[in-house]
């Protein structure tokens, strides 16, 4: 019996295009099913959406604005975009590290099971003891 192909869960409805694209891509890449991982991914996708929204504002308004005294100031959306991108990178990095740790754990379990499985021809015995040297009684 073969395992069914992985089908990613639907993205949360509140995500916009950028977040939805990231959701689908990372769900497929990591084959995410765990509820905690999906919640973490949703936070990362929200941060990407926020960064994209701030980027659109900056494209429309420009990087700087002039206050009532004529001073040129950086647009507040610059900080929002930078913080959101950093947050998304941190969250997605956490998912990647979590997945890598899980893969290593599975590999360790497989190695442990292989080490405990008797090898062909040994009948589950190791060494040989006295029988190996003809001293068995």
Image (tube, rainbow, N blue to C red):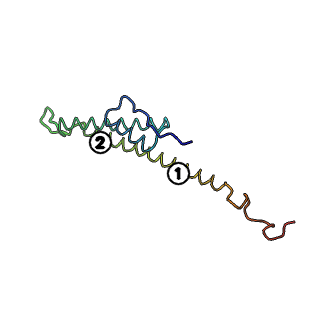
Which numbered dot is residue 82?
2
**Residue that appears at 49% across and 35% down:** 35
Query: Is residue 127 found left or right of 83 in the rendered image?
Result: right
Is residue 44 positioned above or below 14 on the image?
below
Where's residue 111, x and y in %? Answer: 59, 54
The local crowd at label 2, few if under 14, some if 14 to 19, many if 20 or more residues have their Cα within 10 Å, is some
Secondary structure at badge 2 equals helix
The local crowd at label 1, few if under 14, some if 14 to 19, many if 20 or more residues have their Cα within 10 Å, is few
Reading the image, the residue beneath label 1 is 104
Residue at the extreme front of the image, as rendered: 1
Quadrant showing the C terminus: bottom right
Where's residue 89, x and y in %? Answer: 36, 44
Query: Is residue 96 found left or right of 66 in the rendered image?
Result: right
**Residue that appears at 12% across and 36% down:** 70
Where's residue 97, x and y in %? Answer: 46, 48
Which numbered dot is residue 40?
none
- Determine the image quadrant of residue 115: bottom right
Quadrant showing the N terminus: top right
**Residue that appears at 54% across and 42% down:** 2
């Amino acid at each position: 019996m073969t395992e069914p192909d992985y089908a990613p869960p639907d993205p949360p409805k509140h995500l916009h295009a950028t977040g939805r694209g990231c959701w689908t891509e990372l769900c497929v890449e990591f084959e995410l099913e765990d509820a905690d991982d999906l919640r973490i991914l949703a936070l990362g996708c929200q941060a990407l959406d926020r960064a994209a929204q701030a980027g659109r504002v900056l494209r429309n308004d420009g990087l700087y604005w002039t206050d009532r005294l004529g001073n040129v100031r950086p647009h507040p959306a610059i900080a929002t975009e930078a913080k959101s991108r950093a947050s998304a990178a941190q969250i997605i990095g956490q998912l990647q590290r979590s997945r890598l740790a899980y893969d290593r754990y599975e590999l360790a379990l497989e190695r442990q099971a292989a080490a405990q499985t008797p090898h062909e021809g040994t009948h589950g015995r190791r060494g040989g003891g006295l029988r190996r040297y003809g001293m068995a009684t």
